[in-house]
Amino acid sequence: MSTNVSRRTAMRLAAGGLAALPLTSACSGLSRSGGPNTTTESSAGAVLRSRARLPEPFTLPLTVPGVARPSSSDSTTDYYDIVQRESEVEILPGLRTRVWGYEGRFPGPTIVSRRGRRTVVRHRNNLPVPTVVHLHGGRTPPEHDGYPTDLVQPGARRDYVYPLDQPAATLWYHDHRMDFTGPQVYRGLAGFHLVRDDEEERLRLPNGERDIPLLITDRAFAEDGSFDYPARDPSLRGEPGVTDEFASGVMGDCVLVNGVPWPLLEVEAVRYRFRLLNASNARRYRLALDPPPPGGTAFTQVGGDQGLLAAPVGHEALPMAQAERFDVVVDFSAYRPGQQITLVNTLGEGGTRHVMRFVVTRRVRDDSRVPRTLVEIEPLSRSQVRVERDFVFARGGAEHHGMTLWTVNGKAFDPWRIDADPALGSVELWRIRAQNVPHPVHVHLAPFQVLGGGTTTSGWKDTVDLDNGGQAEILLRFDGYRGRYVFHCHNLEHEDMMMMANFEVH
Ligand code: C2O
Ligand code: CU
Ligand code: CU
């Protein structure tokens, strides 16, 4: 690819990013009329206020996304078929919301894979726009990883092949289309993909009905119940606090768990395993239980992004950046039957202080356990490191039509530029810094361990939460496949505005 062509390609793609916002809600007058609320609530971004009537919190029952059935299986592989399509669902009582969903659902069906068995997902795109599917946290060959420009055109289909030779973990799949990930995920293109293995089963953690994935998002609704997403009308440019606020991230005022606003779940007075995922575009949460269990620990964390921990870790609160997963056990036997326990977000205000509520029904027998040790995790150490790299995630260094872009080391994303070239099988140390606002940084393919700062969990991760001014040192292992992958900020508006870079494993 010659320099000329590549530069032109990059510019065209950059231009697409700015068109992204009008596409989704071109006629929304909201940013002008209401003006964004500039409260950041410890996240980068601005809050969009719903104009539709939102339900009373804790009145709607939690739903759990159904598990997808393979359309066929053979000795090595399970095959799935998923249609990406538009559908109308009732999220707010009495109103219809048009979603773009996997199988028309939000969240999409949960795929459950067994470690070492191949999973092939045939995605058919029946949406009016191109899409790309990324399995977040999957160790996937580059051609199936959902590179942002590997588009599946409307009407087309493609098979994504996942070896899934990796430990049991809570993964998720979502759209990753270049420049449009924010609006397309916001419209509903996200779902769980769980990996299970024998080791996990032997632990006898709570399972079955008591192993519940919880996908947490925030959304704003227009008057008719549709998802609202800010317009980036060029005529608004230059009005202080309009384009700029939403360029930092889009937050809603309604918290949905598995697509249900502030749901309610009846639980028995036993242990439950919750796989928490923050699938929000821009919102960060700090989750706590109100009231906390008398004399106990609110959350016993058994797993993180990339699977189970070496040993459980107790937390009174869970800070969760976008795309992070916390696999936790909550023991409701500490509460009495009839008691209501609210999962709160201590970073939120008003409605976004609430996430969901549990009501304890009765005491029953509990055969689950939380063993004192979980799985073996090989700790990486500095002595294995041959190459160190520095990355600064900040605003500035590149512009597009007067709009300051989000950048990595001062550069806007360019699909043709390789920013790091780790060797297959090597361990590298990356020093990552966040500036201007918080940035949750995600690396495809390579799981990592965090050496210091930015996170409260241990074990293997794929996303690290960095505060404004924060820094983390991570040890990454580049195993599995050669080829080109991305790493980026998982604030989806930052990602769409070029805060992404490439590495090529050689
Ligand atoms: Cu969850 Cu590259 O993303
Ligand atoms: Cu990913
Ligand atoms: Cu960011």
Image: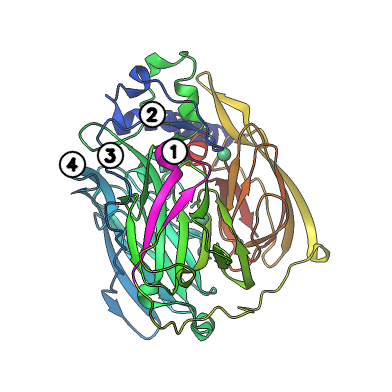
Residue 216: x and y, percent?
42, 52
Q: Name which residue type carries label 3.
A: Leu
- For marks 2 and 4, give the one nearer the viewer: 4
Question: Residue beneath label 1, please?
Answer: 179
Which of the two discs, 4 and 1, labels the residue nearer the N terminus?
A: 4
Crowdedness near tag 3: few (<14), some (14–19) or many (≥20) residues, C-alpha within 10 Å: some
Question: Residue beneath label 2, please?
Answer: 19
Q: Tag 3, which secondary structure?
A: loop
Q: As drawn, is 449 to the left or to the right of 200?
A: right
Q: Tag 2, which secondary structure?
A: helix
Question: Residue beneath label 4, please?
Answer: 95
State the CA–CA distance, disc 2 to disc 3. Answer: 29 Å
Which of the two discs, 2 and 4, labels the residue nearer the N terminus?
A: 2
Disc 4 C-beta below 8 A from ligand 1: no
Q: Nearer the viewer, residue 433 or 383?
A: 433
Disc sitting over residue 54 in the figure: 3
